[in-house]
Amino acid sequence: MTGLRICFLFFLALGSSAVSSQDGKKLSLGEQPIFKVSKAKEEIVVDGIMQEEIWANTESRTFDNFYRINQANDQQKTTFRMLWDEKNLYLFYQMEDKYLTARETKRDGEPYLDDCAEIFFITVPDSLDTHIGYELNLYKASNDFVYFNDFYQGQHGILKTFNPDFDVEVSYEGTVNDNSDVDVGWTMELAIPISNFDGLGTFVPVQSGNKWAFLAIRQDRNDAEGNRRATSTIFPIYDISKNVHQANRFGLMEFVD
């Protein structure tokens, strides 16, 4: 947790006057799309299977913004849901996938080059461009970080010593790293403790009526041997060549009962 406290000091020092390095109009608070996150009133078992009834009753959205599409079958469906309670944020990704692919097995490696589910949070939705990220592949190898847009002279900064605890499970139907057959897809379920956000989560606490900013992303590796990879997002970004860390395009997640 030391790394996150260091991040918090940077957060205060930089202030809200930081200029975004991304092109285009920055969304003002109130303009962003809003995703409703229902409160879980039953225990959520993190097993990669959407078995609790509340999952069917919370909002779901597909990732309809696609980037790096090289072949027609690179545009594959992802359905995303979130829940919350007093202890955790819960995420569920359902992903159609004809070619299940994963390579990374180490923490803080490059799971985003595999089939990978990602989530970025800003715990104060009108703050400067600093966000907390989780990226996990089929092997549950995680890359977790605090990301600073335009940290110094137009360069971005990443705090990699943020290594939080969380629960994650994956289920899949198909064969991993075998393009000789056609797979069905995979799911990922996450429980992220609210305590992971430490002081950054106290300005706008997780409670009914409050909002955070976020971006949910899927990286879709479709070639077991090569580098063919598509990206899809829940909200549109400006230019994929600049990366997906465009905090001025994040939407809002509203905690509801």
Image (cartoon, rainbow, N blue to C red):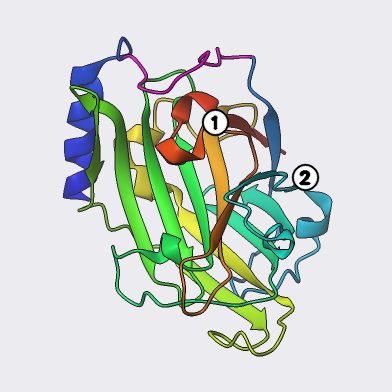
Give the quarter of the figure containing the C terminus: top right
**Residue 21 inside the magenta-drawn segment:** yes
Residue 53: horizontal and vertical position, in percent?
A: 81, 63
**Residue 26 inside the magenta-drawn segment:** yes
Task: Choose top left, top right, bottom left or bottom right for residue 75.
Answer: bottom right
What residue is shown at x 57% (from left), y 75% (from top)?
170
Q: Which residue is mark 1?
A: 250
- Cα separation, mark 1 vs mark 2, equals 17 Å
Q: Of label 1 and label 2, which has the lower sequence position?
A: 2
Residue 57: horizontal and vertical position, in percent?
A: 83, 51
Left or right of 133 on screen, residue 179: right
Where is 55 relative to 244, above or below? below
Residue 87 in view of the camera: no
Residue type marked 2:
Glu
Task: Choose top left, top right, bottom left or bottom right for residue 208.
Answer: top right
Where is 180 relative to 6, above or below? below
What residue is shown at x 39% (from left), y 31% (from top)?
202
> Depth check: 163 or 87 in front?
163
Where is 196 relative to 244, above or below? below
**Mark 1: which secondary structure?**
loop
Q: Which residue is mark 2?
A: 59
> Depth check: 95 or 238 in front?
238
Start and end of the magenta stretch? 19-30
What residue is shown at x 64% (from left), y 15% (from top)?
31
> Depth check: 251 or 21 in front?
21
